[in-house]
Amino acid sequence: GNSVTQMEGPVTLSEEAFLTINCTYTATGYPSLFWYVQYPGEGLQLLLKATKADDKGSNKGFEATYRKETTSFHLEKGSVQVSDSAVYFCALRADSGAGSYQLTFGKGTKLSVIP
Amino acid sequence: KAGVTQTPRYLIKTRGQQVTLSCSPISGHRSVSWYQQTPGQGLQFLFEYFSETQRNKGNFPGRFSGRQFSNSRSEMNVSTLELGDSALYLCASSVLGTAKETQYFGPGTRLLVL
């Protein structure tokens, strides 16, 4: 079946530090890959996505590249801010049978950025 | 465009009761999915509806059910509530539910079972 493994936190960084959150996946076929972010008390917001190999998704200074050869989609940001403190989820969307493409999520990584 | 809305936002029930949660997708979106989020199990897929038909269901007991109306609004129902059903229930919508589409999430309904 489909699965996502991401580094579990919590991760604590100082403002302006470099961020990497590792994510690897297992899927049948050719999944689309996503990073979602969840702020306290809220639902999930799409951060970025990539739908085919070698695509790079980017948004708000965050980037991730779809690496088919290593089945990875690591999230990076060059300089984090306090406002980036949240929980980050890596997810894939692939055929789960019967023409349904549900999201499969990693466990989430809680990021805290301190001034 | 208005986002995905969910009602109610918070709910407290007791064991054995039943509950109905509602989700209104983004206008024009026909696929609606439901997910359960708990600290222990993380985010788990409950079911997906498309054009009033259940297209897929996750590994949850029959106490969990749902439906979708002709205007794409969806409801999920949990009967005979158990303490372990306490969770954040998230609804997400997309136009057709295909692999490359983004699913847009609502704010969730937080259910507490006492």
Image (cartoon, coloured by chain):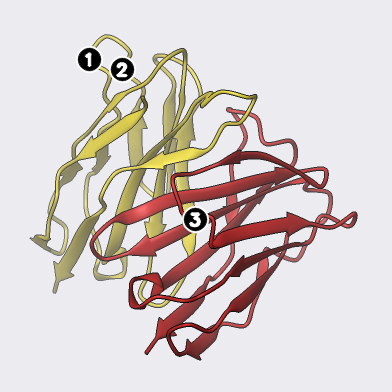
The chain under label 2 reads A
The disc label shown at residue A70, or none: 1
| Tag 2: amino acid | Arg
- Between B70 and B17, which is closer to the camera in this rendering? B17
| Residue B17, percent from left and from top | 53, 84
Q: Residues within 10 Å of mark 2 (few under 14, many from 20)?
A: some
| Tag 3: amino acid | Tyr
Residue at image x 46%, y 22%? A31
The chain under label 1 reads A
Would you place residue B56 above or below residue B18 in this image? above
Residue at image x 62%, y 68%? B77
| Residue B1, percent from left and from top | 78, 61
SS for tag 3?
strand
Marks 1 and 2 sit apart, C-alpha to C-alpha, by 6 Å
Color of chain B here? red
Asked where in the image residue A22 lies, by quadrant, the reply is top left
Task: Determine which residue is flagged by label 3.
Answer: B35
Task: Determine which residue is flagged by label 2.
Answer: A67
Asked whether, in this view, residue B16 is left or right of residue B74, the answer is: left
- Between A39 and A29, which is closer to the camera in this rendering? A29
Marks 3 and 1 sit apart, C-alpha to C-alpha, by 28 Å
Q: Which chain appears yellow?
A: A
